[in-house]
Amino acid sequence: MGKLPLHSLFCRYGSGLELANLAVSSDLLLKAWDAILEIPPTPSGSNLPVSVTYKVSQLPNQTTIVAFGCSSNCNLQHLQGEGSDLVSSPAGFQFVCTKVNPSVSIHKAATDHFASLQAQLSALKIDPASPLIITGRSLGGSIASLFTLWLLDRMDPRISKRPICVTFGSPLLGDKAFQQAISERATWVSCFLHIVSNQDLIPRAFVSPENTSLAAQSTHQTSTSMYMPFGTTLFCSESGCAGFEEPETILLLMAEMSLKSLGANQGLQVFDYGGVLKTLKSKAILRKIGKASEVTNPNRAGITLLLQAIGVIETQEQETSEANALITKVEKKLEIFLRRRKNAFDPNKDLNNRKVNLANMEWYKKVTTNDGGYYDSYKNAQFRGRDELLNKAKIVKDQRILKQYWIKTVEDIERKPQKEGASIRTRFKYGGTNYRRMVEPLDIAEYYSQGKKNYLKEGRSEHYKVLEQWLKDDKVSEKKQAVGMTEDSCFWAHVEEANISCGVLKDGETSQGDKEVSLEKMVEFENYMMNSIEKYSVSTEAFLEGSTFMKWWQDYISIRGNSYESKLTSFMKNKKESSGSMVLMDYK
């Protein structure tokens, strides 16, 4: 690999340094820390082993800060002893659970303390339109995170600004399912910034090399004995600072810090983050590192700089086998993380790209509407000449691209938590309905062309059912007006099944019992058809000469006889076309 200027590697891994320095150079972190220092001593008399209290303050720019602190006896020994238990889906936080992670586990001590303060916190008068910072130190940081989640679940995103949660030296809060459930909500996980010093023991209270190894091996939800970080972690040391988002990398680095601190002074329980923040603010980290003008391996060099900045490896250690092993582990985890992020499916972005495919299908529908009809032209393309086959081949490509997009979109949206998923479904349901009505009839044509039966129960894709349910859940009153496209995307499946029933009735070897069942199906289809006509929800292409529906009608009348009378026979005798839709003429 050729040599690259140092600044180019920041495009890949150096953003952790750039963002970290941006954070510490602003006043946000120092003001949050100062707010924690202003919390009065925790009151005595609590039934809990340690005490947590809070203070609300106002900055000149109308920013509100809610700061949480804890008593000095909340030390490493307490957290690793009686205060380390997890509780599954505690009361008041079931909203965190999702379809993918229906059960989550949270630090019991944190949920107990939050419950003791919840009534007071609920009574706070917070302007939803003004900036809000929620912060805390040690166990107080855990309460700050829970309060932030509690607010995020209750706020109206249309009128409320999302809070920023900044914790200092906070222990891990929940298990892997908890981390994943928060990460599923992109607008939530971005609200959390956790400041961790390599000299502070508290953030690593629930971390060990053993559970780091379990995290690396696990592809599914881990046991409730396993804590996992969420949000962004800003590691800092005397050398500098760097930000990380990938949970397993954060856990790995915390475990490495724990190994390096073995044998060190374990008595230091309260770390002064204000001092280290002021020191880092005065340093020009990027300018200092920039003295090295060239590197031969940008990826490893970028990671090395990150690990040096947070004090995990020393400058002279970067050639040792231990340092190289750590760099390799972090490199692999970050590569996977970046690849997943790059390849992440974004329905909003891809929706515009799919408009071209839908436009091609609309063109095909337009040119076939009066020339055999959209459905039957596609179904019978092989019998209509070379040009029709070429047109169908082009449409099949658009059909496949659209179907792949909407299958992914439906799966992605359905995995979202209920509230977030509901708002996204509202944005996508009309595009999904248009797609379903345009593409599903062609799926039906392909299905029955292969001699198959019972599409509705055996052949219909699950994503069509979900898209149809989205529209039903909308509960918007139907407008009785003519349409250019049949509303029921399964209309032609009903027609095909009716044709199959006609074949059963015409077969001289069919038993009387089977004939009676088929005749009942014919009556059901008649009622379905008339209901669609009365709602103006069926396109005129169904009534074109030679269409699949008209073939059924001719067969059905020949079976019933000319003397047969019904609502549908009355309509078929008096139907008239107008502006591409059916109009009820002299029909009551």
Image (spheres, rainbow, N blue to C red):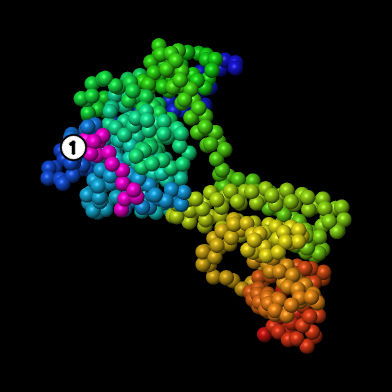
Residue 142 in sight: yes
Across and down, in percent, residue 131 comes to 34, 44
> How many other residues sit within 10 Å of disc 1, few (<14), some (14-19) or many (≥20)?
some
| Outermost residue to the bottom | 563
Quadrant placement of the N terminus: top right
Q: Does the magenta stretch include residue 529?
A: no
Badge 1 is on which residue? 71
Q: Is residue 187 above or below residue 428?
A: above
- Name which residue lies at 56% across and 44% down: 346
Residue at 81% from the left image edge and 60% from the top image edge: 380
Q: Is residue 92 left or right of residue 47?
A: right
Q: Which residue is drawn at 23% across and 39% down?
A: 82
Q: Where is residue 379 in the image (x, y as percent from the top left)?
A: 78, 60
| Nearest to the observer: residue 278 or residue 472 | 472
Which residues make up the magenta segment? 78-91
Front residue of this view, candidates 210 and 14:
210
Q: In which quarter of the image is residue 441?
A: bottom right
